[in-house]
Amino acid sequence: MTLFGWMNDQVLRMTWLNDLVGQGVAAIGLNPASRVGGSVQFFVYDVIKIFVLLSMLIFAISYVQSHFPPERTRAILGGRSGLGATILAALLGTLTPFCSCSSIPLFIGFTAAGLPLAITFSFLISSPLVDLASVILLASIFNWSIALAYVAVGLLVAVVGGTVIGKLGLEAQVADFVRTVPVTGEVGTMSRRQRLAYARDQVVEIIHRVWPYVLIGVGIGAAIHNWIPQDTITALLGQDKWWAVPLATAIGIPMYADIFGTLPIAEALVGKGVGLGTVLAFMMAVTALSLPSMIMLKRVVRMPLLLTFVGVVGAGILIIGFTFNEITHWFL
Amino acid sequence: MIIKILGSGCKKCIALGENARAAAAAAGKQAEIVKVTDMAQIAAYGVMSTPGLVVDEKVVSTGRVLSAEEIGQLI
């Protein structure tokens, strides 16, 4: 085994932890090969792994992100247009600190500064969809080629979605008050100590916000992993079923969960023979399109633009799902 | 002095409000703490990341929960 492979297995995938939890499960008199024992092992191992990785990742990533507040991003993007700028917006979307509760001030701030809709939506789509922490967690649960493929298609959805929305000329569909908002400059800079404090606060705040979703996600994952027969899953979402991808997308859209909560479900589904494209479609639908974020977006854009946004992103997710199901064998 | 906390009512905004109150008390200043939760009004300050802190109509911080000491230096 290569050094990289060993590092990946032991540090990122924490296979030693899985073994240790398995021994612990056996020590309290449960057989890890049994249903109950297997569920307990999956649950304990996944919960510990996700929280340990999340804490370390959020700290490191928040430190980097503290260099890219939205005001800075807007200044970088200001005055640009065209495909290059749309791609840049998608890339910055992965870096800018973001939670769905701040998407509306962001949308208003970008639009008020005169940024084209293409760039604003490219950013808004990529921001929840492709997140640095989720990429590393994907690599931990699956492998690096899947993680990188996820980033690539996530950015593609953002760029193509933004471009299509820009081409449709829907500027008039933005609520009127948005245009009259003043544009202010960057507010202060942080010292290194402040950045470290900010990174620490982000860990506390994000863990506090996502832990219920992670526990529910891992619980569902453990249930799929050990209790639901493979036949049932493949009959519903199997690779030979044309409706697998649309069904997974339709289930995912109204759900509101963090990407960290969807990962254990994705892991268990792939283990049961569900296509990679179906699983990616589910994850993207949950993160990029959710009812709470649509309700918030409705306050600043009119219905035609909102429906276009949902339609364009939904279509992108479906295409990615079908494509990845065809090429699953490249990755697994 | 009027201190405004801009934010949709999330935990961070509540924490920032409490720190601002403590900072004003420590500085011995009479401060009225106002919570602004309406998105249009928040945006009108040009703030893109919440919580935002506004002291006498001037935006002094965005996107961060400042400690009471940090706020003390700003008021």
Image: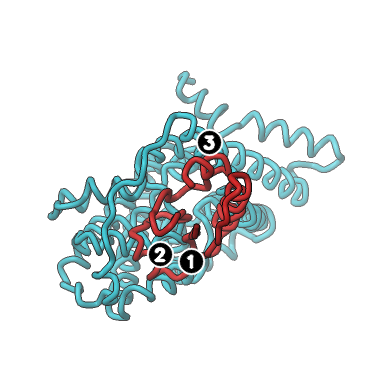
Residue at left 49%, top 60%?
A: B2
**Outermost residue, bottom direction?**
A303
Q: Which residue is mark 3?
A: A197
Q: Quadrant of the C terminus of chain A?
A: top left
> Which chain is cyan in the rendering?
A
Task: Locate residue A170: give its quadrant.
Answer: bottom left
Task: Locate residue A32: give its quadrant.
Answer: top right
Q: Amino acid at mark 3?
A: Ala
Q: Which residue is mark 2?
A: B42
Q: CA distance from mark 3 to mark 2?
A: 25 Å
Q: Colour of chain B?
A: red
| Relative depth, front residue between A93 and B45 | B45
Q: Which residue is mark 1?
A: B36
- Is B26 on the left or on the right of A177, as rendered? right
Give percent across and percent down for residue B58: 38, 55
Name the chain letter of the residue that bears numbered label 3: A
Please, is residue A8 above or below residue A266 in the view? above
| Relative depth, front residue between A320 and A181 | A181
Q: Residues within 10 Å of mark 1 (few under 14, many from 20)?
A: some
- Is A23 on the left or on the right of A143, as rendered? right
Q: CA distance from mark 1 to mark 2?
A: 7 Å
Residue at left 55%, top 28%?
A: A11
